[in-house]
Amino acid sequence: MTSTARPPRFSDRRVVVTGAAGGLGQVVAALFREEGARVVATDVTAAEGVVPCDLTDDVAREELVQASLAELGGLDVLCNVAGIQQFAELGKITAAGLRKHLDVNAVAPLLLTQSYAEALVASQGNVVSVASISSVMGQPYNAQYCASKAALLLGMRSLAVELGTRGVRVNCVSPGGIATPMIEAAAAGLPADANWDLVAKSTSVIPGFMPPADVAESLLFLASDAAASITGANLVVDRGVVW
Ligand SMILES: NC(=O)c1ccc[n+]([C@@H]2O[C@H](COP(=O)([O-])OP(=O)(O)OC[C@H]3O[C@@H](n4cnc5c(N)ncnc54)[C@H](O)[C@@H]3O)[C@@H](O)[C@H]2O)c1
């Protein structure tokens, strides 16, 4: 009798997933485990089975890197999922808020990639980072998030060039609206007199926010051997917002 079940794609692969306490990252970590991976899941928010780490803390982040490499014995896949988003109109943006977006969404994933680079060269592994449609389109009340996600996307594409010469792939997934706690929290920053015509320009043609699993599948694809010839890519998963 032949089986139609797909063989696990990540048997004994060593994976680090950031932002894994909830939302998209939790689903990504669970899917990797289902497919045989050994996963270190981390987040600044406490959760069962998740290693606590504030990725904007240089010392804590480096401790996480060393501890995860020791636990896993190397690394095959780095998944940068952690992120923050708070809507704010121009007059409400603060230097601290803008820097926080840049630190969490761009600086931390780039420095994590730097710290894991030699391990990834050794395993001929890869990096998948969660950017956003906000990386490539202007959105009202979202300048600090858009700026940080644009920095992430082009930073990762630059690393794809550098690390590609050493056999390491670096890709991004750019989601549109996902049904996670982030959307609700971010919306709290919208002004009471928000211009909804402008906001609607970021609305998908296929209605509704996406389930996290729809987006998670794209991360696993890019991390898998099926994507062996894909690097520097930006896989947009948005139900049709960016054309
Ligand atoms: N929800 C959406 O509509 C949407 C759309 C496009 C892109 N994204 C991106 O998807 C990723 C996952 O977001 P989500 O929707 O699951 O949101 P979420 O808020 O549920 O998850 C983000 C996680 O990142 C963690 N995090 C925040 N700051 C951190 C820090 N300093 N150190 C370590 N961890 C930190 C949070 O604790 C949280 O668990 C983010 O990068 C986000 O920007 C989300």
Image: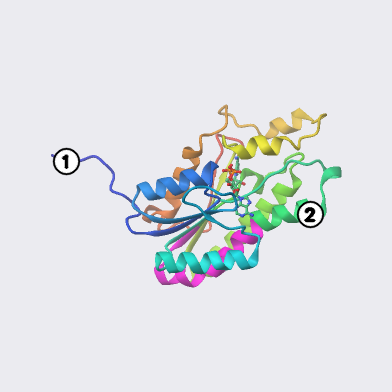
Q: Which residues are magenta?
A: 106-127
Along the line of sight, the residue nearer the viewer: 71 or 213: 71
- Judging by the rendered image, the residue that carries numbered circle 1 is 2
**Which amino acid is tagged 2?**
Ala
Across and down, in percent, residue 215 comes to 50, 41
Q: Is residue 217 magenta-colored?
A: no
Say if 143 sits above or below 169 in the image.
Answer: above
- Judging by the rendered image, the residue that carries numbered circle 2 is 96
Residue positioned 46% across, 67% down in the render: 69
**Which amino acid is tagged 1?**
Thr
Q: In which quadrant is the N terminus drawn?
A: top left
As drawn, which residue projects farthest toward the right?
91
Q: In which quadrant is the C terminus drawn?
A: top right
Q: Is residue 98 left or right of residue 21?
A: right
Q: Quadrant of residue 137?
A: top right
Residue positioned 75% across, 28% down in the render: 197
Say if 193 sits above or below 34 in the image.
Answer: above
Q: Is residue 166 left or right of residue 191?
A: left
Q: Coloring scheme of the render?
A: rainbow
Along the line of sight, the residue nearer the viewer: 109 or 202: 109
Q: Quadrant of residue 62?
A: bottom right
Do the residues under discs 1 and 2 have CB atoms within 8 angstroms?
no
Q: Quadrant of residue 236?
A: top right
Across and down, in percent, residue 7 comes to 28, 48
As drawn, which residue projects farthest toward the left?
1
Q: Is residue 242 visible?
A: no
